[in-house]
């Protein structure tokens, strides 16, 4: 399960709390999200990832729920 945070400038996503990957896109230079800056982050991208990860983890979790929310529907 993944979760994302988006600002006007960035979108940061973690999959399975980062174990299954991360994504960082600069919407100013890459609005169509073709270049994942988290694959080989430079110091500037690393700084953005650190800042957005801290905010994301206060708001959401990438953990898979232990039970489905709507069991009768499944």
Image (cartoon, rainbow, N blue to C red):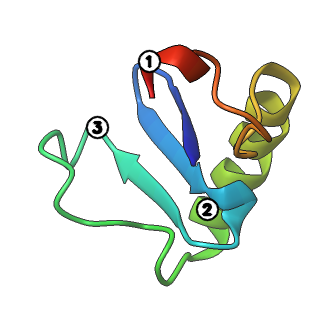
Callout 1: few (<14), some (14-19), or many (20+) C-alpha neighbours within 10 Å?
few
Viewer-side label of 2, 1: 1
**Cβ atoms under marks 1 and 3 closer than 8 Å:** no
> Residue 32 vs residue 3: left or right?
left
Q: Earlier in the sequence, mark 2 or mark 3?
A: 3
Q: Earlier in the sequence, mark 1 or mark 3?
A: 3
Q: Which residue is mark 1?
A: 73
Q: Earlier in the sequence, mark 2 or mark 1?
A: 2
Residue 57 position, x and y percent, is 82, 35
Residue 5 position, x and y percent, is 56, 29
- How far is the residue under mark 1 from the one under mark 3? 37 Å
Residue 13 sits above or below residue 70 on the image:
below
**Cβ atoms under marks 2 and 3 closer than 8 Å:** no
Q: Quadrant of residue 21?
A: bottom right
Asked which secondary structure carries label 3, the reply is loop
Q: Which residue is mark 3?
A: 27
- How far is the residue under mark 2 from the one under mark 3? 15 Å
In the image, 52 versus 16, the foreground residue is 16
Can you tell which mark lies on residue 44?
Answer: 2
């Amino acid at each position: 399960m993944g979760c994302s945070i988006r600002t006007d400038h960035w979108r940061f996503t973690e999959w399975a709390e980062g174990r299954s990957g991360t994504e960082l896109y600069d919407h100013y230079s890459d609005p169509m999200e073709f270049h994942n800056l988290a694959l080989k982050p430079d110091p500037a991208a690393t700084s953005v990832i650190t800042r957005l990860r801290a905010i994301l983890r206060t708001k959401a979790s990438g953990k898979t729920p232990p039970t489905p929310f709507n069991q009768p529907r499944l």
